[in-house]
Amino acid sequence: MSAIFTSLSPPPPPPIISFTEMATSISELHQAHAYMLKTGLFQQPFAASRLMTAAATSSIDSLSYAHTIFTQTPQPNTYMYNTLIRGYATSPTPNVALFLFLKLLCDDQDLLPDKYTYTFVLKACACLCRVKHGKQIHGCVIKNGLSWDVYICNTLLHMYAKCGCFEVARHMLDRMPNRDVVSWNAVLSVYVEMGFVDLAFDFFSEMPVKNLESWNFMLSGYANSGLLDEARRVFDEMSVKDVVSWNALITGYANSGRYNEVLELFDDMQRARVKPNNHTLVTLLSACAGIGALEQGKWVHAYMDRNGIEVNGFLATALVDMYSKCGCIEKAVEVFDSASRKDVSTWNAMITGFSVHGFGEQALKVFSEMVENGFKPNDVTFVSLLSACSRAGLLFESHEIFGNMFSIYGIKPKIEHYGCLVDLLGRFGLLKEAEELVEKMPQKDVLIIWESLLSACRNHGNVELAEHISGKLLELNPQDNAGYVQLSNIHASKGRWSDVVDIRRKMREKLVSKKPGGSVIEVDGVVHEFLAGEGMI
DNA sequence: GGGTTTATAT
């Protein structure tokens, strides 16, 4: 009996395949790869495809390694093509998915795309907004008799909507015999993504079926457009809510700077016994950073410790940012050093932390470590570095960094980078050099840059240059108050009171007013807000 | 042999 049973069951997969599927790092996959090459197992498409899938889809997520395995496989099957096309469709380079689809059609004559291939390649078309290619593939779908497949149709709907062809999508949706809730969601999600909330709401009201995702789309549409009352109304109307619903609302409040409400919502969320996920925690931490709510920030950190949540990527960045914005640079360093995984943003957050605390040298040191560890700095890195130099008065270093930015790292300086340099030169009173730099900028007549230079003129009492720049600023934007305010301040500092009165009169005539500055501080776990010239609220 | 559509984010 047992012999018959054994002969009927499929043979168990070789143990190496189970090993491949459990691998948690590239080096383990490399070991499996080496073993397969040594034993000849790699020649079997099934084994090779399992290895490739592990590289392309698991948490390891190494698409380029998956592609290498694909290239080394003598006769890849459709499954392998599909896995790779899917991987590229959701990567930063979806055009490779299209290229692979063409390769499948042209190079491998004995292979045919199947229904899975179409869903993946259409997804790539949607990401790239290539409706022309999408239509051609739609033609292939019809020709191959796959128009009945609801997965393919839903991806087609999404593709047409994403490319702005809402009428085509609508036409298709109305004629789909087997449409389901995902079909409606596929179109709704695009209205929401593009910020067409009114159209989204009309469409949403018309939907004959709705699920939790539909409600979440509508909710996040309002929340992302800053329409918090509408978002709240949708949220309150929902009979079932999940962590995505809570996150969407919380993120909406956080993006509008209503941080106290963020923390209140989080309390409600806990009372509703919905378990926060990493997104929730990241948003909470950024809210804490925004109002300097150290106690709540520490609470989130402790919550992570208690629940064994790994401090990596997003969360490590959010924690470093929170601690440094709340004034605890030592805690920020501690979190940074012990983070299990860092990405470019985590390094940037640490550099920014040192920068705002005035530790220019440390910021530069972290940058060297970042490069030594093989991370590629981005434009944000250089804003942080240059502003670190500016705050710490590191003139020589800033020139070197600014020079290397393009020549070594290939990053073109943006307005922010020039802004940091102008600020630094201004602090040193090198107004002539600063002016020359501004004149050399490829971006012309940027208000904020001239304003920065103007304030340097004020600090160093350079009236002529200040007058020249003020004139320029008022010419560029007569409603801009910085020009008026700074110029009147300069006149005041020189005791030229009649000029001051004159400028203030002009400001009143044009109804330009100066907005008061403000600040927030946490005392005993409560956040207080101040406006310039006011007492404690 | 196995897998698919819509998805909040520093």
Image (spheres, rainbow, N blue to C red):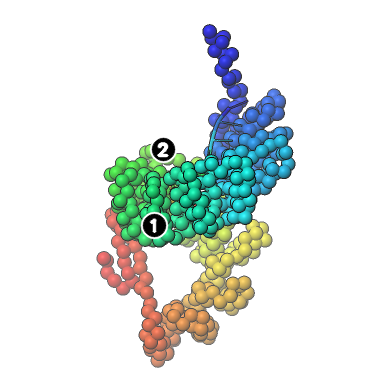
Q: Nearer the viewer, mark 2 or mark 1?
A: 1
Left or right? Give the position of A457 relative to A536: right
Q: Amino acid at mark 1?
A: Phe
Observer-nearest of A188 and A238: A188
- Check the image and report above or below for A409 versus A447: above
Q: Amino acid at mark 2?
A: Gly
- Check the image and report above or below for A89 versus A45: below
Q: Residue at x 58, y 41 (%)?
A: A146
Q: Estimate the spatial distance between the alpha carbons at disc 2 and disc 1, rounded to whole Å.
A: 40 Å
First-in-chain label (2 vs 1): 1
- The reply to whether residue A327 is visible in this rendering is no
Q: Residue at x 38, y 77 (%)?
A: A514
Q: Classify 10 Å Cα crowding around label 1: few (below 14), some (14-19), many (20 and above).
A: some
* Tag 2 and tag 1 share a subunit: yes
- Check the image and report above or below for A182 versus A498: above
Label for residue A308? 2
Where residue A108 appears, as percent x and y from the top left, is 72, 39
Observer-nearest of A458 and A472: A472
- The reply to whether residue A7 is visible in this rendering is yes
Q: Residue under circle 1?
A: A201
| Mark 1, secondary structure of its residue | helix
